[in-house]
Each structure stands twice: as structure tokens, then as C-alpha cells.
Image: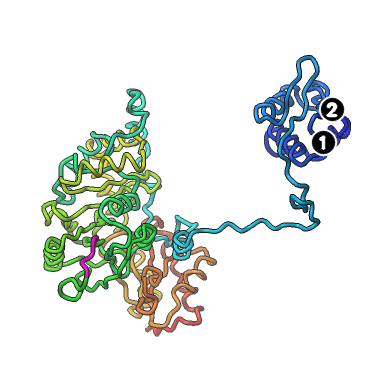
Amino acid sequence: MKDTNLADWLLQHLHGEGAMNRQLHDLLLRAVLQGQLAAGSKLPSTRWLAQQLGVARNTVIDAYDNLLAQGCLLTRAGSGTYVAEVEREPPLGLGRAGAHKAVAPAAPTLSRRGSALLAQAGVSARQWGAFMPGVPDVTEFPVRTWLRLHNRRWHEAKPERLSYAPGGGLPELREALAEHLRVARSVQCTAAQIIITSGSHQAVDLVARLLTDPGDTVWLEEPCYWGLRSTLQSLSLRALAQPVDAEGLSWPGRFKGAAPRLVLATPSHQYPLGMVMSLARRQQLLEHCRQHGSWIVEDDYDSEFRFGTRPIASLQGLDGGDRVLYVGSFSKTLFPGLRLGYLVVPKALAAPFAKASAELYREGQLQQQATLADFIRDGHLGNHVRRMRTLYGKRRECLLAAVQSNFGDALPVLGDNAGLHLVLQLPEGTDDRAIEASAAKAGIAVRALSSYYSNPASARRGLLLGYACVPEARIAPAFRTLAEVLRRAPTFRCKTG
């Protein structure tokens, strides 16, 4: 290709999007790989090409330098820049042998495990607004207080605080958490037993990797948060669903067959239905797990927010620290984007879990952890939780009033005594997933209760309605919109009044 032809071709393909030096590099690279610039051909000088293209000479020099570093060009002293001999791509539409037939690129193939994970994925693109469950009101977070503590930590930043986290996390945060959990949740632990994680998903992943082998049986509540099921199944574990009743996780008498290696439960606030595991059921579960060597993973999901009653003490505190691994996070109490959680393990597991956490995840965010430690120690966490409990209580009352106003007592409500959501039960035969999709088109985010069940045949029908991130003035009109979606649904049959 002659110099003038090259300049004309480049001018035709350069556009206003992206850095000019990157565009020029990519075009020249394509010309070399596709044979438009033959091996051994001389490129025009950087000065001449810059003048023809109307760009700075440094732009052309940068593109040439990158191609030289990649081995696509070479220089000859006193002679100029030439195209190097490289393996070239076939022209578009031609195979290596030159057959005149377009070859479609092969579709990427996922593993069976990867395909199964995506098939059951429940993650939503929308994470805010009426009535997205499980989302706190992040606009109420005390940003100025956090920023002041954060800035103070940066003023005194040490080199080790900008490196990887030590096994288990920042000691200051673990110490602050140990005291906080002892007072707020009756958790019995020392700072050494706490492993800082990036949230409950990572905590469960770590437990499963260290305490199970592929093929082991684990018990999950039915229904439960699908993210836990996905995490366990991705590790090739046999996840068995166990029903819940008014007293929480239920099972027929003693363990039948092989005892589960892990039992995952939400005893203080079952997710998503909201019941509390009774004391008798807690003691029964602890005794069975001690007898069979099973471990209990206690997910203390949004237990801080109870309305009308005091928070329920943790199962871990009742156990004394032998069989229970306690999981918590700050996603609901502070804000999800913080991505900090914790795992409390029995003393005998503290050292191996801390080492494994550092080995697998190479955590950091030590400045963030230090800020959180100050936030807890100075009393800001407790103050924030108390203030938000009052705010969420008012929003809960608004939503209950909206349900009553539109449907009376025709649609029962579950799980409204705690947490950040309630469950609106729907008549049997209602397609709650179709209603979820229709509500989304109307600008309302809800979750179908049936999607939390592993067995569709036994799934109850309903909608999870989150009220925490919805201003009080918005709740009634938003629910009216949802009510209209329900009334138009072909499968919805409800008698009101």
C-alpha cells in the first residue's frame, strides 16, 4: 500500500470516539495482520503521516512505538520503519486454506456447573425503589460522620494499611466487632474467632470449602435465599431442601440416612417467610448436630430490625461456640456497596479459617475496615441502627395500611414483624413470577415468593415487598400501581370486601 493510499484509508476509518493514538494503533495493527501492509514494506515517516491525518506527531509516534514493542514493526538505522514478518489472519470470509466460505465463530461453551448456575440465577438488574426487598435506605446513611472518620484514617495511613489484609482481617475491626456482637446479638467469641469477609456469600463459600468435600450433603431451608443454594451447588455439594413451619427449620425426627455435613439456617428471622425458630427447635437442632458431627451455619439476616419486640438472641450464643458458625454483614445496617461482612467460627477453627481466607481471597480494604472499626467503637453503628429501626417501622406501617386499603384481609401478610420486607400471600394458582414481570414493566420491583423454592410443585405463591428504601409518601401510590397489576393478572383471583 502506497503512502498516500495508507493515509486515505486511515482517514476513512478514524472517528471521533476514543483516543486518536489508540485508534491509529488498532487500524495499523489490523492492516498488518490482514496483509494490507505487506511484510518488509516501509511505513511513511511519523512527521509526514501526522500532517496527512491532521494529528499531532506524538500521536503517530505513540502508535508506531506500541507496534514496535509488539514486534509488528521494526526499524533500520538511517532507513526508517518497516513492517515485520508476523503470522497473519486470513482475509475476512476466508479460511486458512483460502476456501471462499464464511466461518461463523464458535459459541462459547460453559461447563455444566456454569450453565446450571446461570439457569437458576435470581440476581436482578434493579437494586433500588418500590418495592425492592433486601435493600436499606442508603440515602439515610450518615455520610459526613463516615467521611470524617475515613479522612482521619487516611491522614495517619501507614504502608501496611495499603497492602493486603492479614489473615482474618484488621485486628481493630475484629476487636470492635467481638464487643458489638456480644452486646447486640449475645454472640460468644473473641476477636480471633472473627473472619472479615466481603459479605455472606463469601463467608458461606469459605465454610463450604473448608468443611465439606464434593458430594457432601448440606441442608437448606425451603424456601431460602437462592444465592446460598447457588454458592453451594457451584461447589458440587448435594443441597437438600428441608421445610420450615411456624417454629422454623423442620425435619422428621432424627436425621434419616447420612447426616448432613452442613445445616444452613436463619433462626432469628427466616428468609424469606419471617418466622423465628423456637427455643425447643433450636435446642433440638443443636443436639442432633452435636451427635452427628454436623456444622450449623447461622445466617443472622437483618435480625437488627424487629418491630414491637426485642431482637432474638443468636443460636451461636445458645450453642456456646462448638458447632455453630455465625454469618453476618453490614449490607442492611449500613449500605450494600460497603461489601464488608464477618464470619464467627469456633475457637478450634479460627487459625485455619484465617489462613485460608488470606490464601483464597487476598483481601484488602484495610482503610475501610479501620473506618468501620471507629464507626462501631464510637457508637455510630448503634445510633444508626436505632434511628433506621424507627424509620423502617413507619414505612412498614404505611405498607400494611396500603395492603389493607386495597385488599382488606383478602391477602394475608407474612413476616412483617422484622426485617426490611414483608410477604404478600397470593391465592393458590396465581402465577407470581408473571406478576413480578408485569410489575417490573409498570416500574415496580417485587420478588415472586415461588422463586425461593427449589421444588416448584410445593412452592407457595406470593410477593416479597421491600419497604426500607421507599419514602413514606411514595408507598401508597406505588402499591396502588401494584394492585392494578395484580387485578389485571389472568391468574389472580381475589375476593375483596
- Vertical comparison of 155 with 429: above or below: above
- Left or right of 90, for residue 153: left
Quadrant containing the C terminus is: bottom left
Q: Looking at the image, is mark 1 or mark 2 earlier in the sequence?
A: 1
Q: What secondary structure prevails in the magenta region?
A: loop
- Visual colour scheme: rainbow
Which residue is located at x 25 percent, y 41 percent?
354
Q: Position of residue 293 (x, y in %)?
A: 16, 60
Mark 1 and 2 residues: CB-CB less than 8 Å, in contact? yes
- Left or right of 132, for residue 328: left
**Which image quarter: residue 82?**
top right
Q: Nearer the viewer, residue 298 or 387?
A: 298
First to last magenta residue range: 258-262
How busy is the neighbourhood of tag 2: few (under 14 within 10 Å), some, or many (20 plus)? some
Q: Secondary structure at mark 1?
A: helix
Q: Secondary structure at mark 2?
A: helix
Residue located beneath label 2 in the image: 52
Identify the amino acid type marked 2.
Gln
Which residue is located at x 19 percent, y 39 percent?
192
Q: Position of residue 449 (x, y in %)?
A: 38, 70
Q: Position of residue 27 (x, y in %)?
A: 74, 37
Which residue is located at x 80 percent, y 35 percent?
37
Identify the amino acid type marked 1.
Leu
Residue located beneath label 1 in the image: 11
Residue 89 colored in magenta in the image: no
